């Protein structure tokens, strides 16, 4: 059993999401050790609705013990409506330091896949090699908004280092799995000075890139050329993806 992992139960697990590129989703953990300081929207919501009181509470995750039982009840009921299930929008399925969370995530994906339903996975942790043994219908992704470890330590203090994330994603791609990058929230130069071309080259092996702007950091609004910056960055992403045969999605409100 993972040290310090809390345990909760829930009444439901699968839900239809309103996130623009989402369909159905599940969140089988409350809290997240990655502790992102963008800030994390999931943390802000959890605090607003009284599920956690402080940032420190958020860093102490609680696993939903009845996740698999709930999926076994809900999947037969909704299987014809579900195109794909996202893990996760309000936590991280492969958060660092919690093998029980990893094990449950893999078990949940396997169960969902047994209904012929693909999963879209997103992490700031390390994607385990065992995912290569699952049906090749899933899309595995990492969040990557910078190659800078200094920035990562500042903004995603508990998450995996960038190179470990990239390595695990590349290994899945080489094993024939579909891969993707969530490049969101991509920072303005006054938050992190960097070269988008270099980042795009590093992730040129993926099948899909989702690009989106910073929303909740006032520094992005203070950046005088934010509009021009995001228009130009989105153009670069689109051109890069088109020339490399990569699918892309530019999040609403990022560029004109
Ligand atoms: S990985 Fe996602 S859920 Fe976890 S703290 Fe960061 S933004 Fe929040």
Image: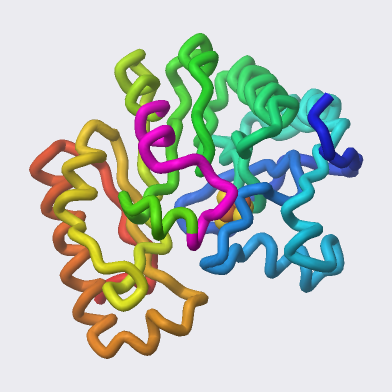
Q: Quadrant of residue 172?
A: top left
The percent position of residue 144, horizontal first and vertical second, equals 38, 49
Residue 206 in the image: above or below residue 235 = above
Residue furthest to the top:
133
Q: Does any portion of residue 81 appear in the rendered image?
A: no
Q: Magenta part of the protein: which range? A: 154-168
The percent position of residue 11, horizontal first and vertical second, equals 89, 43
Dominant secondary structure of the magenta stretch? helix
Question: Observer-nearest residue: 182 or 222?
Answer: 222
Question: Is the N terminus in the top left, top right, bottom left or bottom right quadrant?
Answer: top right
Instruction: Describe residue 3's horizontal placement relative to residue 171 as left or right.
Output: right
Q: Does any portion of residue 192 appear in the rendered image?
A: yes
Question: Observer-nearest residue: 62 or 248?
Answer: 62
**Which residue: 44% across, 54% down?**
152
Question: Observer-nearest residue: 4 or 248?
Answer: 4
Judge whether residue 164 is colored magenta: yes
Q: Quadrant of residue 96?
A: top right
Instruction: Describe residue 19's horizontal placement relative to residue 231 as left or right.
Output: right
**Which residue: 56% across, 19% down?**
116
Judge whether residue 78 is colored magenta: no
């Amino acid at each position: 059993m993972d040290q310090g992992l809390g345990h909760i139960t829930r009444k439901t697990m699968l839900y239809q999401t309103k996130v623009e590129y989402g369909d159905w989703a599940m969140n089988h953990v409350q809290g997240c050790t990655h502790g992102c300081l963008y800030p994390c929207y999931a943390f802000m919501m959890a605090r607003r609705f009284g599920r956690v009181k402080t940032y420190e509470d958020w860093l102490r995750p609680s696993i939903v013990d009845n996740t698999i039982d709930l999926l076994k009840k809900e999947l037969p009921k909704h299987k014809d409506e579900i195109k794909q299930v996202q893990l996760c929008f309000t936590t991280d399925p492969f958060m660092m330091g919690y093998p029980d969370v990893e094990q449950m995530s893999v078990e949940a994906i396997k169960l969902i896949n047994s209904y012929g339903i693909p999963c879209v996975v997103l992490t700031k942790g390390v994607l385990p090699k065992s995912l290569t043994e699952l049906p090749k219908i899933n899309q595995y992704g990492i969040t990557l908004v910078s190659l800078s470890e200094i920035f990562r330590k500042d903004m995603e203090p508990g998450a995996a280092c960038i190179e470990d994330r990239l390595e695990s994603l590349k290994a899945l791609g080489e094993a024939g799995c579909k891969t993707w990058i969530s490049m969101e929230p991509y920072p303005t130069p006054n938050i992190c000075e960097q070269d988008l071309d270099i980042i795009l080259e590093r992730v040129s092996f993926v099948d899909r890139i989702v690009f989106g702007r910073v929303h909740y950091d006032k520094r992005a609004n203070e950046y005088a050329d934010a509009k021009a910056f995001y228009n130009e960055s989105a153009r670069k992403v689109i051109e890069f993806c088109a020339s490399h045969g990569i699918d892309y999605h530019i999040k609403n409100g990022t560029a004109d």
